Amino acid sequence: MSRSSDYDLVVIGSGPAGATTARYAAENGLRVLLVDKKQELGAPIQCSGAVSAHALSDVEVMPESEFVLTPIYGFIVYDEAGNPVYLDYRELKPDVYADAPLGYVVDRRRFDRALLSMAEDSGVESWLKTEALGVDRISPDLLEVRLRRLGQEVSVRTRILAGADGVQSQVGKWFGLATHIKLSELASCLQYVVDGVETEGLLEIMTGHAIAPGGYAWIFPKQNKHAEVGLGVIRTMTDDDAHAYLEKLIKDSFLSDRLKDLRVLEIQGGGVPLAAPLKQQYSDNMLLVGDAARHVNPITGGGIHTALRCGAIAGRFIADVIRGGNTPDEQCMSAYQQRWSEELGESMWRLYRRKREIFRQRDIDRRNQMLFETLSHYFSPESEYRKI
Amino acid sequence: MAKHPVMFEIDWNACIKCGACVAVCPLEAGFISAFDTIAVDKPCDVVCLACEKVCPVTAIRHSDA
């Protein structure tokens, strides 16, 4: 005697992965509810906001001035001593990139809001300030999701639940998935948004165990001559926290002279999984997308592109399941991960194996060299991973 | 040997609400505060202290529960 479903799909978390999953599902005719516990999407910022141009075009998002802070034309990768490799695509491929940017640094608050807006335009219903409390199974075809919306407890019934609730995902844990991430694979990241630092339209990456053990440091341009200066470290490789390394980068590194007039405008941080994708990203009536499924590039820590692509895959997949009249049991949902593997997953696994090879190297000089070479190659036009 | 349970305390002034402590926590769903940090109102009996380590600004401390 169960009530029929209120929605075909409920998505928990309206970041790039969740909003894109919701948008593609709604575009394909599903009734979709998207909830996020925040009052303002994207905040507090836990991300540098770098995203490639093709990542946006792949999911039909225009690089609107509303959220683009600055265009990016390439990279500088430094070794520990400060020797740079310039990968400026305006010079490497002037026929393509003299005018068209390679990517952008986006304002995550505005970007996430724009993605939500696109989802709403496609028919998605969205509730902010709505926290997911838990889920109960009503039947093989129906879940009841318990929510707290602006202080009021409400339940909604849905056929499928998508967990897009980030690196600290609770949805995966509800379904018993092995979502736990090891300390050795979660980069502890801190960045300052600053002014007083000159940049030239390039993402700058500083490598080396003394600079950022287990990760790397960065200087990314932002609008109005602002920049982001940050780094991520793996705490099993050092006794010092990210804050200590960031202060050291500013005060005592090959960049100190350039950073000496820096003024801090914002302080942001986050945990970035430099891990393998989850071995199982689905369960009965459920799938995970984005950071929750660890769809993060394990070499660069970049997660926007992978979240957007995966959201498109998940949204279309769920629409196929519902419209095909299938019961979304575990067997049925496993085809989601199959599609994801074919499009993205296999490359991410290869990147993970390379990352593990680098950081398992015990000789620090050799490890530094491997990371520098891997990142220099990764960002070069010859990289086989250009689309990840 | 079983470890003594601990209670976590968070320096809310230092905390940047990044969620890394929750991400690395091996406890099952729900060991979480209203501010997206690990829980501060119930004891932890795993005592791996990964949350303290991963915190970019070292805002987490523990004491015996």
Image: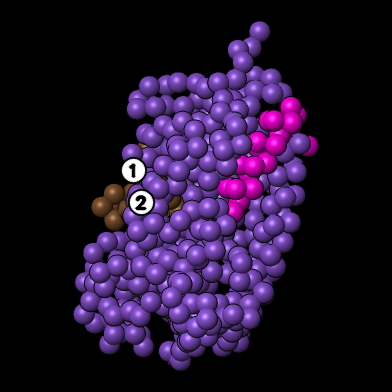
| Circle 1 crowding by C-alpha within 10 Å: few under 14, some 14–19, many from 20 | some
Q: Chain of mark 1?
A: A
Q: Is residue B29 left or right of residue A141?
A: left
Q: Is residue A245 visible?
A: no
Q: Which mark is residue A40?
A: 1
Q: Which mark is residue A216?
A: none
Q: Is residue A96 left or right of residue A249?
A: right
Question: Contact (CB < 8 A) between labels 2 and 1?
Answer: yes
Residue A194 image-quadrant placement: bottom left
Instruction: Decide: is A251 above or below A52.
Output: below
Q: Chain of mark 2?
A: A
Q: Which of these two is toward me, A322 or A257?
A: A322
Quadrant of image for the C terminus of chain A: bottom right
> Overall secondary structure of the magenta stretch?
helix
Residue at position x 46%, y 56% from top?
Answer: A62
Q: Is residue A72 visible?
A: yes
Q: Position of residue B16 (x, y in %)?
A: 33, 54
Instruction: Decide: is A175 above or below A158.
Output: below
In the rendered structure, the colour chosen for chain A is purple
Q: Which mark is residue A109?
A: 2
Secondary structure of the residue carrying numbered label 1: loop
Callout 2, which amino acid?
Answer: Arg
Q: Which of these two is toward me, B20 or A64?
A: A64
Q: Is residue A128 left or right of residue A304?
A: left
Residue at position x 39%, y 27% from top?
Answer: A149
Q: Is residue A385 left or right of residue A59?
A: right
Q: Which residues are magenta?
A: A304-331
Q: Tell me whether marks 2 and 1 sit on the same chain.
A: yes
